[in-house]
Amino acid sequence: YTVDAFGTATFSVQHTYPAGIPTPITATLEVHDSAGGNGSDETHIVCDPSGDAPQTGGDWIGCGSSNTSTQMSIAVTVAGQVVDNFQYRINLDVGKYNTKKKKYEGLPDGIVDATLKYNGGQTNGAPSLTVQKIGTSQLLFKFNLTDFNLSTVSPRNQLRWYGETQAGLPGEPGAGQIDRIPDSGWFTHIIQ
């Protein structure tokens, strides 16, 4: 935790839910201090239902995002196992690209700014992107915050993302989408 000059403490709590736990999940955080003060907050965690895609390996069922002071991580899980005939994508919305300054600026605006891709061990979409296959069903996408002008100290401290699986049909780039996570909208991640 950190304490600022006004005595306000900031801390992070991490919790991993077991694989296969049904969603949505309501996570509640309670804080009690030594002076008898209490506080609580809750968040609803919705990832993606199992079975809403026609093929295993293309059906998103779990996800999460986190960051360190320099790197962003997005973990995604599929039903069954990650397979080579699917492309696994993370679409990022990081703000408007300023062509004169050659950097992303402003708040996320609902437009996909970059697509991180993994297919059969090959990756692309960000200069520092790495994708680690964990077990048979999870992928961990990692990239440097500086790839998209993100910072833990910047006033613009969030990004939005969603994932999709794509089976690909040659000559038909819009066809072949198998599943999206979340089914509509974006996940918002606050850089901490």
Image (spheres, helix red, strand yellow):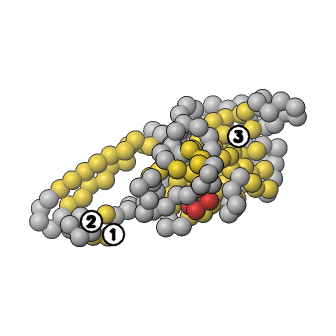
| Residue 109 seen in render | yes
Q: Kindly identify the residue that appears in the image at 76 percent across and 30 percent down.
A: 174
Distance from disc 3 to disc 1, alpha carbons, whole Å, reads 37 Å
Q: In which quarter of the image is the N terminus?
A: bottom left
Q: Residue 58 carries which label?
A: none
Which of marks 1 and 3 precedes in the sequence? 1
* Amino acid type of the residue tagged 2 in the rendering: Ala
Distance from disc 2 to disc 3, alpha carbons, whole Å, reads 40 Å
Which of marks 2 and 1 precedes in the sequence? 1
Q: Residue 1 carries which label?
A: 1
Q: Is residue 64 above or below residue 86?
A: below
Q: Is residue 141 left or right of residue 32?
A: right
The mark lying in front, picked from 2 and 3, is 2
Q: Mark 3, residues whose alpha carbon is within 10 Å: few (<14), some, or many (≥20)?
A: many
Is there CB contact under 8 Å for labels 1 and 2?
yes
* Amino acid type of the residue tagged 1 in the rendering: Tyr
Regarding mark 1 in the picture, which secondary structure is present there?
A: loop
Q: In this view, does 164 lie above or below 34?
A: above
Q: Which mark is residue 9?
A: 2
For disc 3, the marked residue is 165
